[in-house]
Image (spheres, helix red, strand yellow):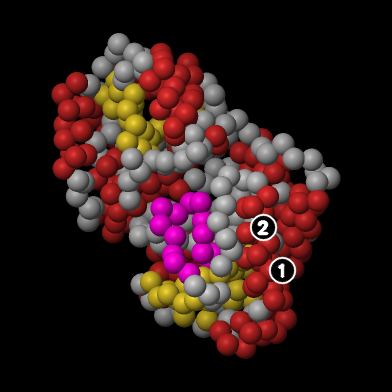
């Protein structure tokens, strides 16, 4: 059976995010499926982008056939990024007949963050009779007007709304990373029986054989342990959506204690955050360079708890699905989660403490509570999260659940 996955931002372990398409595709290849991924040549999520000379240039990574489309680069979320979306979806739509005749997909998965690729998937189906599965990562166009502040009447929002409605109406199945999006999707045309929730996950073998950290990082953490008794760690994007100013507020409130804050990653907000640290002389706060996917297990082993947070948003009524949530569970460390959401896996598995977005005093209290705990009690909290990740969110298990849709 031939599987075609359309994902503008798909990456790999070496390239960086987004990881989900790679992990699923690798599992499907191991299960005996032939898998192709059509992706754009540039993504702001990747640490390394491929060098692409022509559209549909092929590269094989771990048995997965990647086909790169030239879409152009961009910075931020302006018109240039919108143009790359139109290029990616448009090129696939124009080549739909060629794709159907040459790749002969039995299943087409439309999986970009935005819903425009549903039109290409549906057109490919018209030429070869493939099953179409639409995968929802983020709620577009709701994200555009609930977080981005755009008008619902804006032509770009209207375009995305039409695509979203078409995807829900015409797909054979809709796979949602968000657990509580079903009612919304039904209101927009989805038949209830076509909905399935499949979250992000972890790859256990990456954690059982972690890459050793460079000596520079080892030395850094050794110095930290000599100076502090408790380290709060953050890894991931430094963007507005991560609300890291709130974490800096918490660090500033805890100056003079034996608790330190370490942030690793990159993003458009990082320079400003570093400048704020220096201006306000927040001495218990440290910024590090981004780490590779393979370094995460060894890196987070030096933390006493892991922090994650977001800006307050009504979108989290649909649930949360960030990659770092599942990595944090797998790390076996207590999690402090500052997200205004209900019934998250952190509460479900008693793997940490959740407070609302922007609640600085709540974050400080949660960190102090964890720091004051007996080390064995903290360890048990972290192990509950790790057990949940291993038993419920391992990519091998999730890929089998997804693959069941191919055979229906």
Image location of residue 198, percent across then percent down: 53, 57
Image location of residue 113, percent across then percent down: 60, 55
Which segment is the magenta one?
38-52
Location of mark 1 (residue): 119
User: Circle 1 — which element?
Assistant: helix
User: Which of the two residues, 118 or 223, is positioned nearer the viewer here?
Assistant: 223
Question: Who's the residue at 34% across and 13% down the image?
Answer: 255
Q: Is residue 47 magenta?
A: yes
Real-space CA distance between mark 2 and mark 1, rounded to the nearest whole angstrom? 16 Å
User: Which of the two residues, 155 or 25, is positioned nearer the viewer here?
Assistant: 155
Image location of residue 85, percent across then percent down: 64, 59
User: Which of the two residues, 239 or 381, is positioned nearer the viewer here?
Assistant: 239
* Dot 1 alpha-carbon crowd within 10 angstroms: few under 14, some 14 to 19, many 20 or more: many
Q: How many marks?
A: 2
Q: Is the stretch drawn in magenta largely helix, strand or loop?
A: loop
Query: Is residue 165 positioned above or below 213 on the image?
Result: below
Query: Is residue 261 positioned above or below 175 on the image?
Result: above
Mark with earlier residue (2, 1)? 2
When asked about the image quadrant of residue 395, the answer is: bottom left
Location of mark 2 (residue): 83
User: Circle 2 — which element?
Assistant: helix
Image location of residue 68, percent across then percent down: 51, 70
Question: Who's the residue at 35% across and 38% down the image?
Answer: 264
Query: Is residue 294 positioned above or below 259 on the image?
Result: below
Residue 329: numbered disc: none
Report if residue 337 is visible in the image. Answer: no
Decide: marks 2, 1 in contact (CB < 8 A)?
no
Q: Is residue 15 magenta?
A: no
**Quadrant placement of the C terminus:** bottom right
* Dot 2 alpha-carbon crowd within 10 angstroms: few under 14, some 14 to 19, many 20 or more: some
């Amino acid at each position: 059976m031939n599987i075609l996955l359309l994902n503008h931002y798909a990456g790999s372990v070496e390239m960086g995010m987004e990881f989900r398409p790679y992990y699923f595709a690798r599992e499907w290849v191991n299960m005996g499926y032939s898998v192709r991924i059509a992706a754009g040549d540039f993504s702001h999520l990747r640490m390394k982008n491929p060098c692409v000379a022509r559209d549909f240039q092929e590269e094989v990574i771990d048995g997965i056939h990647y086909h790169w489309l030239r879409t152009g680069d961009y910075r931020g979320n302006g018109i240039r990024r919108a143009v790359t979306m139109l290029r990616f979806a448009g090129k696939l739509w124009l080549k739909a007949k060629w794709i159907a005749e040459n790749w002969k997909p039995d299943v087409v998965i439309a999986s970009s963050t935005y819903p425009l690729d549903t039109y290409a998937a549906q057109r490919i189906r018209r030429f070869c009779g493939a099953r179409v599965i639409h995968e929802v990562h983020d709620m577009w166009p709701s994200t555009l007007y609930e977080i981005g502040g755009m008008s619902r009447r804006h032509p770009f929002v209207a375009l995305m709304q039409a695509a979203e409605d078409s995807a829900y109406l015409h797909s054979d199945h809709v796979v949602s990373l968000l657990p509580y999006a079903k009612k919304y999707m039904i209101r927009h045309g989805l038949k209830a029986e076509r909905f399935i929730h499949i979250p992000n996950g972890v790859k256990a073998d990456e954690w059982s054989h972690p890459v050793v950290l460079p000596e520079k990082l080892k030395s850094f953490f050794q110095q930290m342990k000599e100076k502090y008794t408790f380290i709060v760690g953050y890894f991931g994007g430094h963007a507005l959506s991560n609300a890291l100013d709130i974490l800096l507020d918490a660090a500033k409130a805890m100056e003079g204690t034996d608790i330190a804050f370490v942030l690793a990653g990159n993003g458009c907000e990082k320079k400003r955050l570093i400048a704020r640290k220096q201006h306000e002389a927040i001495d218990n706060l440290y910024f590090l360079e981004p780490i590779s996917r393979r370094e995460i297990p060894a890196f987070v082993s030096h933390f006493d708890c892991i922090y994650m947070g977001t800006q307050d948003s009504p979108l989290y009524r649909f649930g949360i699905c960030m990659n770092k949530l599942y990595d944090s569970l797998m790390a076996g460390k207590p999690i402090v989660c500052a997200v205004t959401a209900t019934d998250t896996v952190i509460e479900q598995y008693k793997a940490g403490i959740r407070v609302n977005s922007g609640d600085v005093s709540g974050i400080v209290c949660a960190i102090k509570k964890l720091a004051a705990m007996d080390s064995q009690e903290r360890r048990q909290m972290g192990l509950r999260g790790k057990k949940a990740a291993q038993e419920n969110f391992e990519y091998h298990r999730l890929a089998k659940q997804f693959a069941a849709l191919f055979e229906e």
